[in-house]
Image (tube, rainbow, N blue to C red):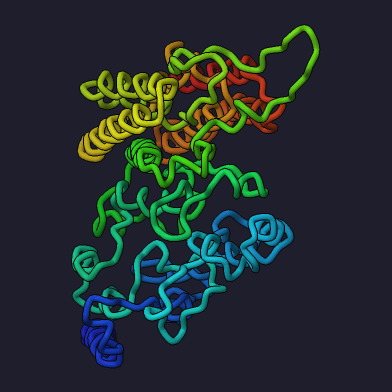
Amino acid sequence: MVDQARPQRKGQLRILTAVLLLALLPASQATGNPTFEGVATCAGSTCHGRAEGNGAVVRQDEIATWQEPSSPSGAHSRAYAVLGGRRGQQIAASLGLGNAQSAPACLGCHATNAPVGQRGAKFTLNDGVGCESCHGPSGGTWLAEHYALPATHASNIAAELTPLDNPKARAGVCLDCHYGSSKPGQFVTHSMMAAGHPRISFDLDLFSALQQHHDIDADYVRRKGPPDPVRFWAVGQAEAVRRSTSLFAQPQFAFEGAFPQFYFYDCHSCHRTITDGPNRKLTFETNPGRPIPFGNPPFNDENMIMLSAVAGALAPGEAGAFQTAARDFHKAMGQGPGEARAAAQALAARAGALSEALSARAYGDADAFRVIAIIAGEATSARFTDYAGSVQAVMAIDTLLNALVREGRVTQGAAAGIRGDIARAYKAVDEPNAYRPADFRAALKSAAGAIGRLQ
């Protein structure tokens, strides 16, 4: 006979456990100074440390996904260890930072670098980018509440769990490290890149898919609503533009000594082969979206190009104002620092308005098709003159095609036939110094055309 009281007793036990945990928390945690309790606190076999993802509500094997040693899903857990490798130590030595694994300039993104006074008993820096980097500090807030009946997603958010189902909130968390922020240790400088730090790039939906450690099942949809990949991608582009221009508008980030902070600029516009022969060989193409003086290094506008495309497709009421602000910003780069920062503030505001519009709108089956068509259309593809913008475009087509497959709008077989063109586009941007704009645009156009014919 089925024990009808078992679910009730189980719920009562969870509530009792939560109450006991709350009682054991240090008093300081209940006074608005929450502690970071570390990955080990989440790793119990009854929580997120199962060997198999067979939990009733969530998978419960999230720690195993986070620790995966060879796939992108485990990248966050490897972030601290990377600092101890040859490349990490070389970068730190070049910059005079000492040991990279203790340098604040590195730990802001390569670990959950909680203030010393807010580190719980199980906290350790060598966890890397742990659970609380994304979900927020757990001690004294959501830790003991998020699994206790009758907890809901809304009550967890009220207890200060970061609402990562909200695309703006998720983009904000990701961009802190995958672009930069004004927080300590979370801004990549040109000096860091000159010392060997990889180039930064960002695509919210693609990065989310690589890190996903949950199932989007009926229970997830009931608790949080159905996530829309087009919304996440579009809002991610808007928030990336807002973040980059907001930081650039602040003098402490826009300059590095007497020079502009070249981190904001398109790396490959300067890092080209230089020859002294009598016949010049131009290594760039005129970009219709960048009205800048000849010879000026352009601001890296990879996300601006994508946002301009998505605005035209999904928020036409905001598109004209954004595109004007973007052109004014590029134009101001040839006028002076004050003009450039003012134009950056204006562009950040337009990106913010677009983010609000893209967050609030309803999404339909045709949206991904419309965005893909505009990205590969003549008005947008003419701007793919540089490596960075082209990388962003092929990632967009790739992630939007994946979204169409997941939603059942495109079959796996049809997508497989298109991936050859996408692979050709990736190949054209595989090596920055061998970037082939014409080949890239042809491959992208072919892929987009094939996708469009499936609508």
Q: In which quarter of the image is residue 22?
A: bottom left
Question: Going 37% across and 67% down the picture, which residue do you hit?
Answer: 58
Left or right: where 310 falls relative to 414: left
Foreground pick, 281 / 308: 281
Foreground pick, 274 / 425: 274
Left or right: where 379 falls relative to 384: left
Residue 222 picture location, percent across and down: 24, 57
Q: Is residue 132 above or below residue 330?
A: below
Q: Quadrant of residue 446?
A: top right
Question: Going 23% across and 88% down the picture, which residue do you hit?
Answer: 19
Q: In which quarter of the image is residue 409?
A: top left
Q: As drawn, which residue projects farthest toward the top?
A: 279
Q: How many labels does the image show?
A: 0
| Quarter in which the C terminus is drawn | top left
Left or right: where 454 falls relative to 91: left
| Quarter in which the N terminus is drawn | bottom left
Q: Is residue 185 above or below residue 51?
A: above
Foreground pick, 281 / 48: 281
Residue 313 picture location, percent across and down: 32, 22
Please indicate, yes or no, whether residue 230 appears anywhere in the rendered image. no
Question: Going 55% across and 31% down the picture, which residue do you hit?
Answer: 266
Q: Is residue 293 above or below residue 123?
A: above
Question: Going 50% across and 59% down the picture, which residue do you hit?
Answer: 109
Residue 189 picture location, percent across and down: 54, 47
